[in-house]
Amino acid sequence: MGLIQSVIESSGIPTTSVTLLREVTEKVDPPRALFADYPLGYPLGAPDDPELQRSIVEASLSLLTATDSLPRIESFSP
Amino acid sequence: MARISDLRWKYRAMMRAYSYRTHDWRPGASLEKPLSEARVAVVTTAALHLPDQPAFDDSRKGGDVSYREVPADANLDSLLVAHKSDAFDHRGIEEDKNLALPLARLGELAGEGRIGSVNHRHFSFMGSIPAPGRLVSRTAPEVAGLLRDDGVDAVLLTPV
């Protein structure tokens, strides 16, 4: 995923992501990622939990306003 | 926390040994307008596809680098997950596709003015591509070009 992200970013569109595997993301080195501490298969937290899903989406999108000090990997806190 | 050490040994061995490829994105792109005016698209690697689209090929050596276009008004419940991998628990995504393709959530955010709009289409890849040569040279740049054609201002990437 991070590799696709880096290709899109280099085409000129700012990108952000959600990651479940911080150690992999640190190696792939995309520009912005929100580390969500959930099991594999549950990137936006839980099924049928719109509030949680939404807060993860918004937290990831908020990284887009950062343009300096890239790359940025932040942790989601519910 | 989802850690490599928690995965089954075969995935663990693969992920530890794997030399992750990077792609130079520096210095990085910047959002040219407030998020409240931005058109947003999602690119997921959850291998989601519409019933009338060909499934991803989970058995292809090196990985399937193709992608599927998912219209914003697709019926999320009808989407299929082509991943056969037992590296993750499939139950959540089978129950609610928003878990990896949050189109309902983006629609809500657009309705409330938190983002400008939701792009009319989104893209799905299958993650875990051990040989990403053609992903980097062909399919990922193709999707980037389509997103640029659409005037997308920001992209959210989600795994599964």
Image (cartoon, grey):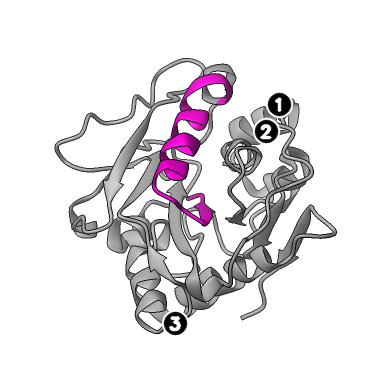
In the image, residue B4 sits, relative to residue A46, either above or below, namely above
Residue type of the residue flagged with mark 1 = Tyr
Quadrant of the image occupied by residue B81: top left
Residue type of the residue flagged with mark 3 = Glu
Between B68 and A68, the one nearer to me in the picture: A68
Q: Which residues are magenta?
A: B136-160
- Do marks 2 and 3 share a chain? no
The verdict on residue B134 being magenta is no
Q: Do residues under tags 2 and 1 come within 8 Å of each other at their CB atoms?
A: yes
Please provide percent x and percent y for residue B114.
48, 79
Q: Residue at x 60, y 38 (%)?
A: A11
Report helix, strand or loop for mark 2.
helix
Quadrant of the image occupied by residue B4: top right
| Category of crowding for the residue at label 1, using alpha-carbon neighbours closer than 10 angstroms: few (below 14), some (14–19), many (at least 20) | few
Q: Which residue is mark 1?
A: B18
Please provide percent x and percent y for residue B83.
38, 38
The verdict on residue B152 being magenta is yes
| Residue B111 appears anywhere in the view | yes
Q: Residue at x 28, y 57 (%)?
A: B72
Q: Which residue is mark 2?
A: B15
Q: Is residue A50 left or right of residue B50?
A: right
Report helix, strand or loop for mark 1.
loop
Please provide percent x and percent y for residue A78.
61, 81
Which of labels 2 and 3 is toward the front? 3
In the image, residue A1 sits, relative to residue B98, either above or below, namely above
State which chain disc 3 sits on: A
- Residue A51, label in figure: 3
Between B50 and B85, the one nearer to me in the picture: B50
**How far is mark 1 from mark 3, CA to CA?**
36 Å
